[in-house]
Amino acid sequence: MHKFQLVFVSRLINHQKQVQDHYRALLLPLAYLYNYE
């Protein structure tokens, strides 16, 4: 039970990190264009 919770939490954290990286990859070009203008 405890081990399962630990795996679940670690996967959740890893998933959130992937989502953040995905949004950062999307926002980077937008920020570049915004600063360029």
Image: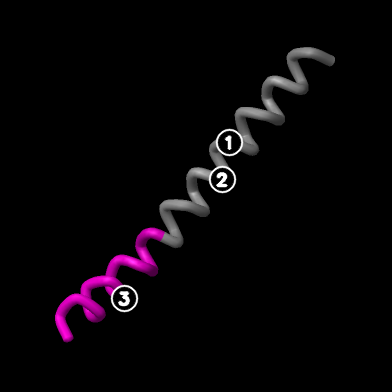
* Mark pair 1, 2: CA separation: 5 Å
Q: Secondary structure at mark 1?
A: helix
Crowding around mark 1 (Cα neighbors within 10 Å: few <14, some 14 to 19, many 20+) is: few
Q: Residue furthest left?
A: 36
Q: Quadrant of the C terminus?
A: bottom left
Q: Residue 36 sits in which quadrant?
A: bottom left
Instruction: Say if the magenta span includes residue 31.
Output: yes
- Closer to viewer: mark 2 or mark 3: 3
Task: Please name the residue that numbered disc 1 is placed on.
Answer: 13
Q: Amino acid at mark 2?
A: Gln
Residue 18 x, y percent position in the rendering: 49, 48
Name the spot of residue 25 as percent of width and height, x first: 35, 62
Q: CA distance from mark 3 to mark 1?
A: 26 Å
Looking at the picture, which amino acid does disc 1 mark?
Answer: Ile
Q: Is residue 7 above or below residue 25?
A: above
Q: Main secondary structure of the magenta part?
A: helix
Viewer-nearest residue: 35 or 15: 35
Q: Residue at x 49, y 44 (%)?
A: 17
Circle 2 Cα neighbour tier, 10 Å, few/some/many (<14 / 14–19 / ≥20): few
Left or right of 32 in this view: 19: right
* Frontmost residue, 27 versus 5: 27
Determine which residue is flagged by label 3.
30
Would you identify the image quadrant in which residue 35 lies? bottom left
The region drawn magenta spans 24-37
In this rendering, would 32 be left or right of 6?
left
Q: Which residue is mark 2?
A: 16
Q: Element under label 2?
A: helix
- Left or right, 15 with respect to 5, comes to left
Whether label 3 touches label 1, CB < 8 Å = no
- C-beta proximity under 8 Å, tags 1 and 2: yes
Q: Earlier in the sequence, mark 3 or mark 1?
A: 1
